[in-house]
């Protein structure tokens, strides 16, 4: 689970619904390891735990991640890929980059064609797909 509590703390882990309710989680998503591994936990990049290049969906690909810095600020990252000018990132690249940005906790979200960042109705990155993909979920910031 990756989620945010009522106090805007990013939480990650294997949690039950009751455990999340007890923690005050207000928003959460369920991540499958191969598509959404934990990247940074308690300030340490989990490069030993992320999928290697032989795992489906690994290698250099478009990626999406969420993280939180020590001061509580939230990091949202989208990496383009699958193009001649930008190949993408591996999960290890993503973990190290989120740590370099100051994340004390971070997790990968669905990547590939799902990696899109929209701000005020405009797609801000250059997604692999030539048409905007209708994603079933996302992080909405207001």
Image (cartoon, helix red, strand yellow):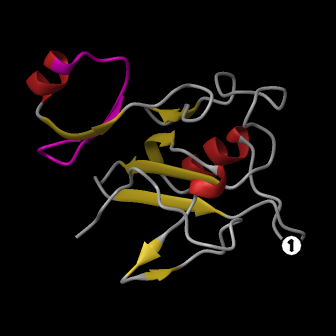
Residue 93 in picture, x, y percent from top left: 72, 46
Residue 81 in picture, x, y percent from top left: 75, 61
Of residue 25 and residue 17, the one placed in the foreground of this image is 17
Q: Which residue is drawn at 45% across and 74% down?
A: 118
Q: Is residue 91 left or right of residue 68?
A: right
Secondary structure, mark 1, is loop
Q: Is residue 88 magenta?
A: no
Residue 121 in picture, x, y percent from top left: 39, 82
Of residue 5 and residue 62, the one placed in the foreground of this image is 62
Of residue 51 and residue 140, the one placed in the foreground of this image is 140
Q: Give the range drawn in magenta.
A: 1-17
Q: Mark 1 points at which residue?
A: 85
Q: Is residue 133 above or below residue 24?
A: below
Q: Residue at x 56, y 31 (%)?
A: 37
Q: Residue at x 81, y 41 (%)?
A: 59
Q: Is residue 6 magenta?
A: yes
Residue 140 in picture, x, y percent from top left: 30, 62
Q: In what quadrant of the picture does the C terminus appear?
A: bottom left
Which residue occupies the extreme right position in the image?
Answer: 84
Tell me where residue 30 sits by quadrant. top left
Q: Is residue 22 left or right of residue 60?
A: left
Q: In what quadrant of the picture does the N terminus appear?
A: top left
């Amino acid at each position: 689970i990756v989620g945010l509590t009522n106090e805007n703390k990013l939480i990650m882990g294997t949690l039950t619904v009751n455990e999340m309710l007890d923690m005050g989680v207000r928003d959460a998503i369920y991540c499958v390891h191969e598509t959404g591994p934990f990247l940074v936990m308690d300030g340490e990049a989990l490069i030993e735990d992320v999928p290697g290049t032989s795992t489906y969906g690994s290698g250099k690909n478009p990626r999406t991640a969420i993280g939180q810095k020590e001061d509580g600020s939230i990091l949202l990252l989208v990496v383009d890929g699958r193009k001649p000018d930008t190949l993408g990132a591996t999960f290890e690249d993503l973990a190290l980059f989120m740590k370099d940005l100051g994340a004390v906790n971070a997790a990968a979200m669905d990547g590939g064609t799902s990696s899109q960042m929209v701000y005020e109705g405009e797609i801000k990155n250059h997604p692999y797909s030539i048409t905007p993909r209708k994603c079933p979920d996302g992080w909405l910031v207001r």
